[in-house]
Amino acid sequence: MRSFLSLALLCSLVTANPVVKQNAAVKARTDQSKPPAGAIVVDATGAIPGSFKTVQAGANALTNHTTATQTLFIMAGTYNEQVYLRPLKSALVVQGQTAHPESYESNTVTIIMNLNRNTRATNDETATVRNWVANSKFYNINMENNAGHPATLSQNIVISAQAPNQGYYGCQFIGYQDNILAQNGTQLYAKSKIVGVVDFIFGTGGKVWFEQVDIRTFAIKGYITASGRLSADSDAWFVINNSTIAARDNDVNPGSTYLGRPWKEYSRTVFQKTEMSNVVNPAGWSQWNATVPNTAHSYLAEYGNTGPGAARTGRAAFAKQLSAPITIEAVLGPKWKTASYVDTTYM
């Protein structure tokens, strides 16, 4: 005899699931299948009247004569260009067209470029997207730098986050070395995917929280983070919370990836409540190099991680195991939930 759940019981089970509730909240938040009223629209086909064919042309149309939030809406397509978002007086929302804003897997917008330090003078100038806008939010944009790994001057940034109060939601960041330059102020990356090999989360002054991000490595020996915190009194943080680490493909050897290495003497990075596959090296962490280890004053720590890559046996002697997790308030501040760049439906 078959048994059936009542409709009421089934609904209660679904609504009690926090992941289901969160995804429903994201979908209810906004319709990203079409541009909202008043948005500056980018459409590579030019089919939409008044739209711009490149993202940079749309960015150039943003005005500095208002303090009201501006929206840049990008229609589906692959945009082969570098984008510079200059500082604005207003907040900024950048949206990629999608019917499923709750997941990066359904993104339809990709911005891709292939610059590195062999052709540009600074790290920032190599970035596919250079975001200098404070109080900005990105939704469902794939950003990629496919410059690969030149023998020298191999820095090739995907996103250069140069201003405080920036949030990235349902995005993908795909590169090789130094993908995310989280340089200044409070930043939040949520429900996104980060793909790279060497030091692909780095920066000196950012107070950065990563929530439910999928970190994927490929190819050869690599390092996920390279904190460049400059002094003992700096409030810079990298905290990776409730996330996953695994190989992008099946060609990555076990133990090939380190959680990070200290770029500067006071590096500070924590991985917590994160599922780690066997691509993570048993030592967990590496010194910067044999000549300049940068381990004496660094704060490289873990809490409550799981999976074969999270085993404590063999962890580097200079790393720490915490007795309690770092709170988001410690990184983003006590009023983070009401900050303009934070979208709590992704948390």
Image: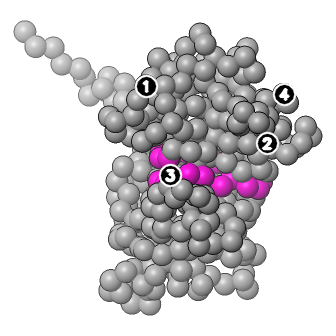
Residue 287 place in picture, x, y as percent: 70, 31
Residue 103 left/right relative to 45: right
Q: Secondary structure at mark 3?
A: loop
What amino acid is found at the position of numbered circle 3 in the picture?
A: Tyr
The answer to whether one can see residue 131 in this image is no
Circle 4: element type: loop
Of mark 3 and mark 2, the one earlier in the sequence is 3
Query: Residue 115, image x and y in percent?
Result: 53, 68
Range of magenta residues: 173-196
According to the picture, the residue beneath numbered tag 1 turns out to be 254
Residue corresponding to mark 4 = 296
Indicate the amino acid at tag 1: Pro
Could you tell me how far apart the alpha carbons at marks 1 and 4 are, in whole angstroms? 28 Å
How are the residues colored? Answer: one colour
Q: Is residue 335 above or below residue 148?
A: above
The residue beneath circle 3 is 176
